[in-house]
Amino acid sequence: MSGPILGHLARRGVQAAQDHFKQASPAYVAKLQQDAALYEQQGPAGEINPMELLPIVITAIIALALIASIRYSVGEVMSSLAMIESPSSTAIIEPKASPYADDAPPAYADAEKESFIPSEAEPDVEVTVIAHKPITSKVVTTMGHLQRIGGFRARWRGLGLSILYHGLHGTISNLLAGFMGFGLGGRFISYVLVSLGLARIHMVWTHSMIAYPSAKPFWRRIVPRKQCKAILLPSLVFAVAQQATIGLPLMVAFAMGLPEIKREHVMATAQHENCGQMALLALRFFAVPATAIFVVLAVLLPASMTLTRIEAALLPEDEQTIVPFDKEAIVGELDLTVRGSSKALFVQAWRSIDRSARLRVVKMYVKMVLAQFTIVVIGLHLAMAEFYVIGGERLAVLIKSGAAQVKLMAIEVHQQAQADAMNN
């Protein structure tokens, strides 16, 4: 769910950098030139051997690999299992114990025997129903369940199809957006169209995460086109929800006038200790993440769960999910070949999401973020320790000089582009 969000943030960052370079003053350029020459001015004593940076690079690679692994195993595989798992129970049938099994019957038992015998024979067994705790209620139990089924690598099941799907989606959507124009409308339409076109591959990816291992190659696991009409509507809703997660907070930001707020205005308000103005600014800034959280919980999460449940309901008959899944609760008596059944299936799957299932998925995502944050904190502390051992002052000069050189190159490229545009 985070792919389009990260892509949009990257584009916004590039646009912000270009706007910043447009306003580069001569004094700012002179300061960058001075910073760019700092490393060379140190002489041989300040030079850094590239091999000295190897521990920091290795630490960064390991941290990024762990973050990506947690993102996929918890955020994709385990969350998909949590989305489809249904409550399960076990019925234990035992012989019904006699009330006089251990003690002798009282003396009046024979005299009043007929009055205690009901008109119909009582059942001679007792049925005890035990409700099981969901497997996906904890990350540890889900991980153990995956490992028992597919071994250590089961936590990354379906990774190849994930790479294929996201690679195709990113490439085709960018090409289509470039053809249609790079406006927000072009990106929105291209993203939705590509999501619908790749819906069958997305369903195979979901099946590879939630079903028992299969010896079939992925192209043989693709559900026939005639049986895939039911996933078009949930795929459309999910794609629109993903774009709404980005678009609605941006619309709120522009409606609140946040892009026009300058840093100097915020600093001046804080210095004058204008509590009312500061509270109003805080509310305006808080409105953006609040809108994003609301859209994620109220729209994106149910849309994702609905799509996953419908994809699980379309799992071939010769395959089975690795967690309890009540297909009848979603499909029921619907005939998917009848026109209009796709809409009814979508509504039925959306309504089948109960509070416990939604809460279980939210907890899964929260645990994923906490685990990733822990890895980031540990990695930063290790990198800082290595930074200090290698020589913090020399590395600081190198980073400052390199950043200044990159900014100078960006300014030169922008000025050259402006000159070419004027000449043409």
Image (cartoon, rainbow, N blue to C red):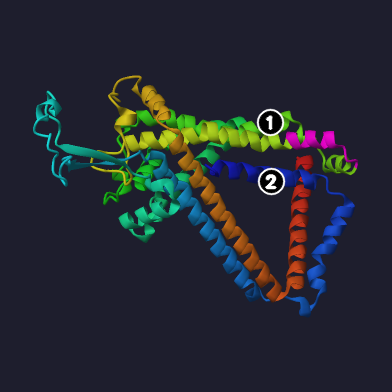
Q: Secondary structure at mark 1?
A: helix
Q: Secondary structure at mark 2?
A: helix
| Secondary structure, magenta segment, majority class | helix
Tell whether position 218 is magenta.
Answer: no
Q: Which mark is residue 13?
A: 2
Residue at 33%, 19% in the rendered image: 339
**Outermost residue, bottom side:** 45
For disc 1, the marked residue is 252
Q: Position of residue 17 (x, y in %)?
A: 74, 47
- The amino acid marked with disc number 2 is Gly
- The amino acid marked with disc number 1 is Val
Image side of residue 175 versus residue 357, left or right = right
Q: Position of residue 311 (x, y in %)?
A: 36, 36
Depth-wise, is mark 2 or mark 1 nearer the camera? Answer: 1
Spatial distance from mark 2 to mark 1, Cα to Cα? 19 Å
Closest to the observer, 348 or 18: 348
Q: Which residues are magenta?
A: 272-284
Quarter of the view holding residue 111: top left
Quarter of the view holding residue 344: top left
Q: Which mark is residue 209?
A: none
Q: Is residue 78 above or below residue 112?
A: below
Q: Is residue 381 visible?
A: yes
